[in-house]
């Protein structure tokens, strides 16, 4: 395992006496305890006189060699007692579990003192600190120590865990006279990727109780439940492009640039075309960017994970960084999958504009996301939605994001299609004698969200009046309750188009096609004459 090899190399090189081990998996703690007692000499070329465990939550010191809980003087700190062990003889100290800033603060002075202590070097004493996130310690302490991020699990480890679970189940059934043979396939080992050792074991047991076998869907469901604990939404898309009114230019462009290569990777490889890695949908609020993303995921035949900035940030320093690390690991284990990040501008703001009022958390999260998006082996497709530009240039760099697509308010034909979708496809509204073309004409510059609300408001008016059908009068009455500042929207759209023309990763041919589609379908050209003149300059 890479992390053990890294630890051994750095300890033999006397890099430091203190190692911060980042992991959420308590099985790793048991693993370290085991080889500290059994394999320390073969790994580190010395025999420890003591292996002492300090449980911070219980305030207990235990000598693991003798399995004796040490009786502590109530007037003396457990850390002082631990320091005595480290200073007097070769000792391996295992400290757990640091998951709050308060825990790190308690340890800070001792960890800093131990890290470069010459006496500890001479005694070959070593301190191993298990933490949810090394960032809980201040930067100066981290420099004195050495931090190691322990990966959730390797295929070999997962196979071993699964074999152990299978053996225990088979033996249990055999003792009752029932023959049971559980198969462990490569699909199962792959399906359990992204889970730590404890979760692999738990998911395997749950799978057996549900299906009497190890089933891929059980491991996927387990990951989805973990994502939900982080308030992330895992979606199996139910809508496709046929349920997205209008936007034919955008649909066709996405079909060619995104869907075609992803559905035909061999064909893309033949032509030397890399697979798409991400796009940004930049458009006016309410134009259905997130809705469009779900439809695109359906067209791709992929599930979708919805992610918002609120899912990444937490009030406690250190919690956000740890959260990003686990979320991205889980997402990649579910790949190929579409990752929809709404309001991506909140986490992709140009870093020079970020106020350093959060102990640098925002900048660190941005850097972590950039690292993830830039990984060559990333299999997830990022779709970021925003109505704000510019974003951090590093986010929009080719290799992280392939395309930036403009999403304008729906044109006349699109508005008509959206009204049809919301009255006959997404929901069945009993309309009669409703001229949807006229409704579309009178809703110039309305967004898809506003058109959906119009349909619902008209239906409510019909219901309140106990009408058998939703009529044109209901639509006209509902329209009176909405006020749209057309002039302001024209100005905002002109600004957005101007911004797009200055950005990289923008296909100018598609941009012009999107503008033409937006303007040419309007029935009353006088309404867009000024805009057309502005766009042509």
Image (cartoon, helix red, strand yellow):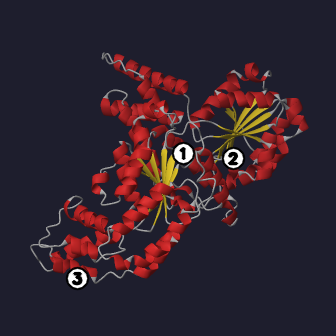
In the picture, measured across the screen, residue 326 lies left or right of residue 201, that is right
Q: Nearer the viewer, mark 1 or mark 2?
A: 1
Disc 3 residue crowd, few under 14, some 14–19, many 20+, Cα 10 Å = some
Spatial distance from mark 2 to mark 3, Cα to Cα?
60 Å
* Residue where numbered disc 1 is placed: 328
Report crowding for label 1: few under 14, some 14 to 19, many 20 or more residues within 10 A (C-alpha).
Answer: some
Mark 2 is surrounded, within 10 Å at the Cα level, by few (under 14), some (14 to 19) or many (20 or more) other residues, namely many
Q: Residue at x 88, y 40 (%)?
A: 117
Residue 477: image tag: 3
Which numbered circle lies on residue 134?
A: 2
**Disc 3 element:** helix
Tag 1 near tag 2, CB within 8 Å: no
* Quarter of the image where the N terminus is located: top right
Q: Nearer the viewer, residue 86 or 136?
A: 136
x and y percentages locating residue 151 in the rendered image: 60, 35
Q: Residue at the location (51% across, 44% down)?
A: 277
Report, in whole angstroms, how far the alpha carbon at label 1 lies from the one at label 3. Answer: 48 Å
Left or right position of 456 against 110: left
- How many marks overall? 3
Q: Vertically, is 201 above or below 388?
A: above
First in sequence: mark 2 vs mark 3: 2
Q: Nearer the viewer, mark 1 or mark 3?
A: 3
Q: Looking at this view, is 342 or 214 the one in front?
A: 342
Q: Say which label, 1 or 2, has the lower sequence index.
A: 2
Left or right: 451, with 473 as reference point: right
Q: For the residues marked 1 and 2, what is the alpha-carbon distance in whole angstroms?
A: 18 Å
The local secondary structure at tag 1 comes to helix
Q: In which quadrant of the rendered view does residue 125 lie?
A: top right
Asked whether, in this view, residue 227 is left or right of residue 363, the answer is left
């Amino acid at each position: 395992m890479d992390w053990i090899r890294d630890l051994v190399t750095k300890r033999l090189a006397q890099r430091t006496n203190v190692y911060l081990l980042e992991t959420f998996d308590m099985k790793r703690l048991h693993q370290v305890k085991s080889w500290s007692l059994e394999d320390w000499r073969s790994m580190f070329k010395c025999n420890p006189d003591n292996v002492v465990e300090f449980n911070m939550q219980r305030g207990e010191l235990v000598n693991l060699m003798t399995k004796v809980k040490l009786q502590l003087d109530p007037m003396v700190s457990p850390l002082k007692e631990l320091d005595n062990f480290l200073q007097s003889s070769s000792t391996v100290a295992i400290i757990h579990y640091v998951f709050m800033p308060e825990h790190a603060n308690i340890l800070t002075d001792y960890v800093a003192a131990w890290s470069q202590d010459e006496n500890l070097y001479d005694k070959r004493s070593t301190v191993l600190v298990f933490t949810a996130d090394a960032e809980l310690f201040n930067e100066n302490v981290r420099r004195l120590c050495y931090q190691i991020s322990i990966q959730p699990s390797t295929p070999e480890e997962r196979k071993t865990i699964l074999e152990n679970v299978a053996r225990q189940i088979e033996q249990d059934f055999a003792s009752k006279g029932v023959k049971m043979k559980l198969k462990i396939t490569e699909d199962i080992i792959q399906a359990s990727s992204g889970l730590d050792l404890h979760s692999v074991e738990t998911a395997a047991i749950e799978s057996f109780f549900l299906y009497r076998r190890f089933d891929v869907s059980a491991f996927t469901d387990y990951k989805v439940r973990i994502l939900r604990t982080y308030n992330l939404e895992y979606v199996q898309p139910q809508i496709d492009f046929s349920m997205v009114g209008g936007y034919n230019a955008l649909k066709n462009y996405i079909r060619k640039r995104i869907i075609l290569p992803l559905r035909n990777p061999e064909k893309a490889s033949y032509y030397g075309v890399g697979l798409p890695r991400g796009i940004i949908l930049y458009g006016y609020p309410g134009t259905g960017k997130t809705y469009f993303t779900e439809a695109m995921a359906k067209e791709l035949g992929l599930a979708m994970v919805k992610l918002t900035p609120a899912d990444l940030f937490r009030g406690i320093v250190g919690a956000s960084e740890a959260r990003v690390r686990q979320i991205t690991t889980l997402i990649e284990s579910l790949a190929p999958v579409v990752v929809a990040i709404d309001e991506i501008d909140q986490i992709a703001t140009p870093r020079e504009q970020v106020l350093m009022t959060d102990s640098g958390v925002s900048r660190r999260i941005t850097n972590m996301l950039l690292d993830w998006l830039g990984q060559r082996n990333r299999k997830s497709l990022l779709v970021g939605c925003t109505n704000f530009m510019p974003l951090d240039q590093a986010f929009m760099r080719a290799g992280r994001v392939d395309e930036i697509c403009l999403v304008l308010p729906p044109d006349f034909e699109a508005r008509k299609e959206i009204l049809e979708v919301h009255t006959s496809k997404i929901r069945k509204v009993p309309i009669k004698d409703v001229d949807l073309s006229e409704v579309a004409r009178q809703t110039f510059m309305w967004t898809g969200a506003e058109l959906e609300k119009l349909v619902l408001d008209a239906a409510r008016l019909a219901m309140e009046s106990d009408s058998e059908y939703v009529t044109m009068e209901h639509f006209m009455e509902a329209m009176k309750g909405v006020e749209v500042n057309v002039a302001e929207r024209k100005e905002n759209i002109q600004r957005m188009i101007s911004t797009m023309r200055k950005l990289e990763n923008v296909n100018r041919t598609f941009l012009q096609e999107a503008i033409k589609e937006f303007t040419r379908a309007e029935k009353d050209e006088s309404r867009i004459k000024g805009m057309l003149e502005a766009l042509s300059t």
